[in-house]
Amino acid sequence: MVRAIDIVKIALDTFGAPIYVRREIVHNRFVVNELAEKGAIFVHEIDDVPDGQRVIYSAHGVSPAVRERSKARHLKVIDATCPLVTKVHIEAVKFAQQGYSLVLIGHRDHDEIEGTLGEAPNVTQVVSSVAEVDTLVVPDPDRVAYLTQTTLSLDEARDIIHALKLKFPNIVGPHSQDICYATENRQVAVRNVAHEAGLMLVVGSTNSSNSNRLVEVSRNLGTHAYLIDNSQAIDPKWLEGVQNVAVTAGASAPEVLVEDVVNYLQQNGYSSVEEVEVMPENVRFGLPPEIIQAIGGAGGAEAIPVR
């Protein structure tokens, strides 16, 4: 997510405003508003971008149909799709070419699902719950494969995959799980600290799938949890009688918002702060070639740490 945000910033610095961005670059209001102030113009569809202009695809990826429309409109594309999402797209194409019916586990209204579904729409069905698995009908029950949205809850994905395996014993999946490591790490961290906290505050926007999953994980463990954009969204009543408050954030929430929440808590009686790191996040992905070429070649561009 940090990679996608930085790509927009670099593009603005390199090419100047305006820079068009298809959909929200990441699902965080603060980030989108900040980039809009710098000159990014967020549009819903490629058709909203003037012919020949520069456009950035969001971290959630796009379908082949969007790429074709961009090409037809002679748009200058910078692809900020998360490499982990690209991995899922490649897997979808591979399974479709091998003759599998494809089950895509995720939320139908999410941008990432829309993009992945577009890779093999004729053989792909989306399921969002265990109950929906029962209604699946495929041409050959022995030729079924599954993929998952990268920002799902680990529990959510596990339960649906289990139901799929019961219905289709020969179902196959990716060699490694599709859920984003940053999403997984945060969910594991919530599991580790929820039992010690009387309240969990998750910094993130309401349309952020991975942020909502963190709230769900905490609540499923019996700890009260709320999704907040910033410290101003904290209801003082939530803190009444609460000795320990845990703070986490969605993958697209900037650090400044987390610090804002921590400062608010310190000013309201929670003076002791302990940082818990479950797993170091030091994965680095390179910049898109369009950016590298524009700023003078790979020798002048560093990889960006991703979270």
Image (cartoon, helix red, strand yellow):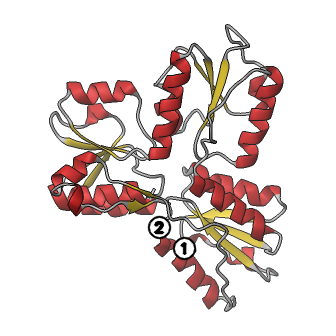
Above or below, 175 against 179 in this view is above
Is residue 169 shown left or right of residue 286? right
Q: Nearer the viewer, residue 206 or 280?
A: 280
For residue 254, which numbered disc appears in the image?
A: 2
Q: Residue 299: percent from the left, percent from the top?
A: 22, 60
How many numbered marks appear? Answer: 2
295 lies left or right of 260: left
Mark 1 element type: helix
Packing grade of label 2 (10 A; few <14, some 14-19, many >=20) is some
At a point 32% along the width and 53% down the height, the residue shown is 287
Residue 283 circle label: none
Residue at 74% across, 56% down = 217
Question: Where 202 sits versus 24, above or below?
Answer: below
**Percent x, y of residue 85:** 49, 41
Q: Amino acid at mark 2?
A: Pro
Q: Residue furthest top?
A: 139
Q: Quadrant of residue 195?
A: bottom right
From the viewer's perspective, is 297 left or right of 87?
left
Residue 151 image offset from top left, x and y in percent: 59, 47
Residue 22 visible in the snapshot: yes
Q: Residue at x 63, y 83 (%)?
A: 265
Q: Identify the mark at residue 258; answer none if there is no mark.
A: 1
Please state if 200 lies on the left or on the right of 61 as rendered. right
Amino acid type, callout 1: Val
Residues 32 and 112: in front is 112
What's the residue at 19%, 54% (across, down)? Answer: 297
210, above or below 305, in the image: above
Are dots 2 and 1 in contact, CB under 8 Å?
yes
- Circle 2 — which element? loop
Q: 10 Å neighbourhood of mark 1: few (<14), some, or many (≥20)?
A: many
